[in-house]
Amino acid sequence: MSVIAEIIDTLEYKVGKLFEKSKALEKNNQVLRLELTKAAQIIQKQSEEIEALKKQYDTLKIANSLLGSDNNKRETKLKINSLIREIDHCIAQLSD
């Protein structure tokens, strides 16, 4: 019977160790999930900032062209023509 008792004690010990490892892994998993959530939020904020900066850059390019810079004149003319077409389209819709 002492052999069976030793086997049971060994099993209890091993099950206890497995339970502790399981709890530690669950805690680690929870920490990693929080870090992942924070990283996703940071990425989202940075993506929004990038889009805002791109728009600001485009606006500055157009403003620079309007002030007489030779760079990007073609893009500025195309943008102005596009805006004029949109205005003409709106006027046509209003007159109908």
Image (cartoon, helix red, strand yellow):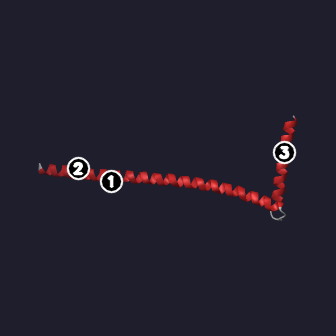
Category of crowding for the residue at label 2, using alpha-carbon neighbours closer than 10 angstroms: few (below 14), some (14–19), many (at least 20)? few
Write the residue at 77% across / 60% down.
Answer: 61
* Residue appearing at x 68%, y 58% in the figure: 53
Residue occupied by mark 2: 12
Give the spatial CA distance, label 2 vs label 3: 80 Å
Residue 30 horizontal/vertical position (percent)? 42, 51
The tag earlier along the polypeptide, 2 or 3, is 2
The amino acid pointed to by label 1 is Lys
Label 2 element class: helix
Q: Which numbered disc, 2 or 3, marks the residue closer to the eye?
A: 3
Q: Mark 2 is on which residue type?
A: Glu
Label 1, on which residue? 21
Q: Amino acid at mark 3?
A: Ile
* Frontmost residue, 30 versus 8: 30
Question: Residue 12: x and y, percent?
Answer: 23, 50
Q: Label 3, on which residue?
A: 87
Is disc 3 surrounded by few (<14), some (14 to 19) or many (20+) residues within 10 Å? Answer: few
